[in-house]
Image (cartoon, grey):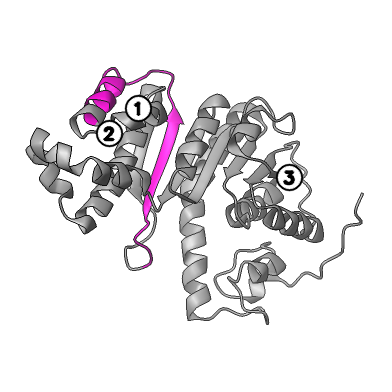
Amino acid sequence: MLATAQVPKTPATAIPDIRPGQSIELLKELHILTRDGKLNQDSRRKLKQVYHLYNFIEPLLEEVISAHGDLTLADHGAGKSYLGFILYDLFLKAREGRHMSGHIYGIETRDELVSKSRELAARLDFGRMSFLNLSVEDSIHSPELPEHIDVVTALHACNTATDDAIRFALHKQARFIVLVPCCQAEVAAVLRKHKNESFAKTPLSEIWRHPIHTREFGSQLTNVLRCLLLESHGYQLTVTELVGWEHSMKNELIIARAAGQPRGNARERLEQILAELNLDELHERFVY
């Protein structure tokens, strides 16, 4: 077992905007604080975004804890595990010693990022975090993960990585799914591929006639299909913007809550859209 290094603690209350008890070392590692532990204009903006995202997720975690007294969260496509570390620091760490175990799993395919996250968690003494170098398929069946996960997150999961996170969440019967999709290219590529056929089939093809519209419409349509997929599996959705448009164009936040009652026509609508827009080859991805 690796020895855990003791990290000197700087009183968070000494820095404006930082919540009491937050790890200053973590905020430096995430480049939210400068190396000398200060906030500048850019880092203050980053901190504001962190708190904004946390304000969406915290009530979901509280609901799980209230119902079960425990919590499992898997962050898919975790990258540097930015989100997992923030949730641990602001939520789990503050509840230590309250007979609540709780565990956060970061799932990432890049081994070097997994190694760095493990090192940082050990250095900060964040003992209830695990980082797994697994593909989506492997993560679904891996004995390193529990059979059920309460909350699944995927923050800025590019292109089909968001769909992979959804598939994982459905297998794990997640109570909540929190998604911030990014760089959705697959649907746009299929729209382009069948553009000539679509011109002959439907006047709706004018929506994606021009390349920039193809990209934008494809991105919008991807998230509509994802929402219908989740609704067909019994989830209720909240779709909103994460931060102001001045900060990011990849801004859509999808929060899905397991309700146990599928929307009656969700699957039918999904299949109709795929057929109408010449996207039948994506049937397997969005209808299951």
Q: Is residue 64 shown above or below 35?
A: above
**How far separated are the C-alphas under marks 2 and 1?**
7 Å
Residue lying at 65% horizontally and 33% vertically, measured from the top left:
138
Q: Position of residue 98 (x, y in %)?
A: 74, 40
Which sits earlier in the primary sequence, circle 3 or circle 2?
3
Q: Quadrant of residue 227?
A: top left
Residue designated by label 2: 279
Camera-near label (1 vs 3) is 1
Q: Position of residue 237 (x, y in %)?
A: 36, 34
Q: Is residue 175 visible?
A: no
Q: Dot 1 lies on which element?
A: helix
Mark 1 crowd level (few <14, some 14–19, many ≥20, 10 Å Cα): few
Q: Position of residue 71 (x, y in %)?
A: 65, 35
Residue type for callout 1: His
Which dot marks residue 130?
3
Instruction: Work out whether residue 159 or residue 89 is closer to the camera in this orientation and state it.
Output: 159
Q: Is residue 219 shown above or below 201?
A: below
Residue lying at 48% horizontally and 51% vertically, measured from the top left:
55
**How far separated are the C-alphas under marks 1 and 3?**
34 Å
Q: Position of residue 112 (x, y in %)?
A: 71, 57
Q: Quadrant of residue 198?
A: top left
Marks 2 & 1, CB-CB < 8 Å contact: yes
Residue lying at 65% horizontally and 76% vertically, measured from the top left:
14
The stretch drawn in magenta includes residue 100: no
Residue 236 appears left or right of 271: right
Residue extent of the magenta highlight: 247-273
Which dot marks residue 283?
1
